[in-house]
Amino acid sequence: MKFACTQENLIQGLTMVSHVTGKNVNLPILGNVLLKTDHGNLRMSATNLEIAVNCLVRGKADEEGEYSVPAKLLLDYVSLLPSGKVDLTLTDEGLEIGSNGQETVMKGMPASEFPLLPKLAKGEGYSLSATDLKRALSQVTFAASTSESRPELMGVACYFGSVDGKAVATFAATDSYRLAERRIPLGAGSVRESRSIVPARSMLEISRIVSSYRDEMAGGEDVIWTFTDNQLVVTLGNVEVVTRLIEGSFPPYQDIIPKAFRTEAVLQRTELLKAVRAASLFSRQGLFDVHLTFDPDAGTCAIASADQGTGKTKTAVKGTVTGVANKVTLNFRYVNDGLSAMQTDTVRIQLIDDGNPVLILPEPASEAYRYLVMPIRQ
């Protein structure tokens, strides 16, 4: 193998793929990146057996070949090289890296020992805006469960189809204590209905890649989302992510979202967020409780907490409160996560009573986003 490219292209490719690698006592090669010439360019591949990332690096290949080297070591070293041309040459000693008079030989492992990456026959995919997808995943993925007792809740449910005559993609996640749902428009093309559950860890990796992808690597701003029988292929320009899907059925969460409410409040988001964080300092350890009291006459929502050991606090946030006087106790961490995921200046809080889920929405509804929090029962 003999390949040459710019240091910038090499770093960008390694940044895309190296994040999924890691130390594995039983399979040390999972810490490596596979380098393989591909029609004059260089294809980098890495996997942790759950998710695989491929990236095509543009350059010039004079000799074909393939080899695997430690991903982190290669990225750390290439990052220290000066800008300009970098030569990669496979020799009997290992991978020789040459740049501006610097010569280094990096030991690796034969490509034959690298895990076999699946050759997927991709069907017609869905087209999504990279900006919309990045935002949607940041608003939803954190709500997925980390408990292995219910594997289907450790993923993000993906629904593709038509809603109210519009082609949309809906992403939803829940840990049974809170629920996040975001809907984004699909690009032009036929609308085929599909449902699947993608592991939350894979969604985080997809989000990271979409966020760090740069136009210089070529390719458009659209992400192509393609499902096979039990895998998902996400393509963005020269980068491809392949991940397994979670088997099972996602709970019919639409059934638990209330349709009518007794109290509604429109409040300043940052003021509410500060009040919740202040109350969190005095919430009971292990319970993480904050108490929200809605007063339509005063037009306020009071956020309070008390602990025998640390003290108590109460903050009244002014806004527009309609309906009946009401109160509810919530986990401050869940409220904080939901408010932080929104970008609007104000939010709308809707509730029935202290025994039913509380719905938090961006106001105005500039994004098709819903966040539901289950109350703490006293």
Image: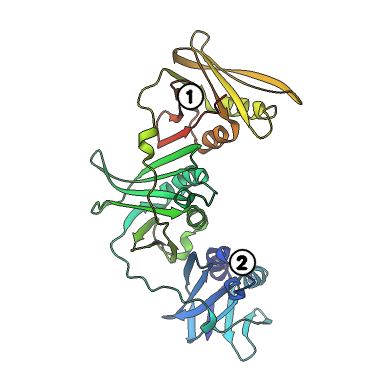
Q: Are marks 1 and 2 in contact (CB under 8 Å)?
A: no
Spatial CA span between label 1 and label 2:
44 Å
Q: Would residue 122 appear left or right of 19 to someone viewing this image?
A: left
Reading the image, the residue beneath label 1 is 355
Task: Give the x, y percent position of residue 62.
Answer: 49, 87
Under mark 1, the amino acid is Gly
Crowding at label 2, few (<14), some or many (≥20) Cα neighbours within 10 Å?
some
Tell me the amino acid under the disc marked 2.
Gly
* Occupied quadrant, residue 367: top left
Mark 1 vs mark 2: which is more N-terminal?
A: 2
- The vertical placement of 105 against 260, above or below, is below
Q: Give the class, few, some or many, for how many residues have Cα within 10 Å of label 1's Cα (few <14, many ≥20).
A: some
Disc 2 target residue: 22
Residue 283 lies, in percent from the top left, at 67, 28
Image vertical order of residue 131 relative to residue 299, above or below: below
Looking at the image, which is closer to me, 229 or 107? 229
| Image x and y of residue 272, in percent | 57, 25
Does 364 appear above or below 172?
above
Q: Tell which tag, 1 or 2, sits nearer the viewer.
A: 1
Q: From the viewer's perspective, is 21 left or right of 124?
A: right
Seen at 51% across and 57% down, the residue is 205
